[in-house]
Image (cartoon, coloured by chain):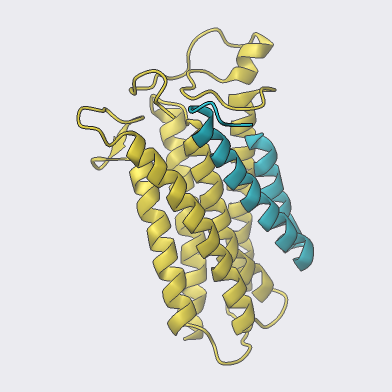
Amino acid sequence: MTGIRTVVAHFCTLAVCGVLLGAFYEQFAGTVLPCPLCILQRMAMILCAAGPAWVLILSTRREVGPLDYARGYGASILAAVLGAAISGRQVLLHIMPGDPGYGGAVMGWHLYTWAFVVFVVVIVVSGLHLMLGLPSREERLPWPRLSRTVFLVLVLVTAANAISVFALAGLHLFLTDDPTSYLLFEDLGWSSTSAGTATAPAGIGD
Amino acid sequence: MAAIIFLLILGSLIAMWSGRTRLATVLFFVSLLAVALLFNHHVTDALGLSL
């Protein structure tokens, strides 16, 4: 079971990093910039990954016990509930027939719909882990070097998101509902063209 | 605002990395609260109810 717990913790962290990198690909290679609700979902996803990542980084220093797992996956569930509320709100914003939704679709679903699925999966996996997967006593997890690397990937993805959002919002307090350019570069006079266009009607893009 | 929240999350992760568990926990919950409040702002802003 120790091996399964280790694989699950690594997989949960890397899966969320993969989803966030996919969102980055959509942002830079696609045609649409992330809206405020998309950014909030990214934050919630990083907080979801922080739970298993905490268990991983703890395991590189000492043995981890049931309380450490409970704290990590409990934190993930809290973040996933918040994330599901945010993505659920965005799904409901575009639920009317004929609404094109916000941004492009991946395998038929928009990114916020996929985000809702990811948050529900995080809740289910974390819940099952807490019910069935807790160790009876403290244990040492294998692969400390891999654990450190996975944690570092999460840190780098978070830092990249911070930079990206700073470029999007510039020195403005809040992001615009339907962003069409990087406000920081626009304010500095480095960019005069739009970097992306939203497909949603103006005012309800979110 | 969003960039500040990302920095809070980053601070929480760095505190985890450096073994400062209590600071990491506090920053995690502050980040969670900040995300919830920002979400609340965006939800209520369209209705003219946000602060």
Chain in cyan colour? B
Q: What is the number of callouts on the image?
A: 0
Q: Residue furthest left?
A: A97
Front in this rendered view, residue A102 or A52: A102
> In the picture, which quadrant includes the C terminus of chain B?
top right
Position above or below: A54 against A36: below
| Quadrant in which residue A138 is drawn | bottom right
| Residue in the image at 47% along x and 44% along y | A21
Position above or below: A204 against A38: above
Q: Residue A72: x and y, percent?
A: 59, 69
| Quadrant in which residue B26 is drawn | bottom right
Position above or below: A136 against A9: below
Front in this rendered view, residue A116 or A63: A116
Position above or below: B48 against A14: above
| Residue in the image at 78% along x and 61% along y | B23
Is residue A198 toward the left or the right of residue A1 in the image? left
The answer to whether residue A163 is seen in the rendering is yes
Q: Residue furthest bottom?
A: A136
Q: Residue B1: x and y, percent?
A: 67, 34
| Quadrant in which residue A165 is drawn | top right
The answer to whether residue A111 is seen in the rendering is no
| Residue in the image at 63% along x and 72% along y | A144
Q: Residue A164: x and y, percent?
A: 59, 32
| Residue in the image at 52% along x and 18% along y | A181
Front in this rendered view, residue B8 or A167: B8
Q: Colour of chain A?
A: yellow
Is residue A184 toward the left or the right of residue A91 in the image? right
